[in-house]
Image (cartoon, rainbow, N blue to C red):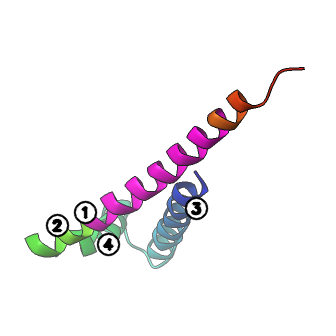
Amino acid sequence: MKMIAIPIVMMMMLTGMSFGIDILQGFELRASLFNAVNPFLVMETPELAVFIFFLFCFVMDAFFAFYRKRKNVTKNSKKQPQS
């Protein structure tokens, strides 16, 4: 879970800082939001596909690591006799 939570929290903090800087410079909230989303709007289709693929691989890797860890914990708990 840390592998997913840390990047999400970092992204939220950096986006918030970007909004804050834009507002301090005098931009409206709508223009600030457009500045935050603009890099994704100018991506071409192959770039967007690669970005989504990498995001998918990252999420699946975290999911499989969590699944393997949970499976090992349940397997070990079944092996130990109850006293």
Circle number at residue 44: none
Specify the quadrant of the image occupied by residue 59: bottom left
Res. 44 visible in picture? no
Task: Find the residue positioned furthest to the right.
Answer: 83
Kind of residue at disc 1? Ile
Kind of residue at disc 4? Asn
Q: Earlier in the sequence, mark 1 or mark 3?
A: 3
Circle number at residue 52: 1
Q: Earlier in the sequence, mark 4 or mark 3?
A: 3
Secondary structure beneath disc 1? helix
Q: CA distance from mark 1 to mark 4?
A: 20 Å
The residue at which mark 4 appears reads as 35
Q: Is residue 13 left or right of residue 44?
A: right
Which of the two residues, 41 or 54, is positioned nearer the viewer here? Answer: 54
Secondary structure beneath disc 3? helix
31 shown above or below 64: below
Q: CA distance from mark 1 to mark 2?
A: 5 Å
Q: Which residues are magenta?
A: 53-74
The residue at which mark 3 appears reads as 6
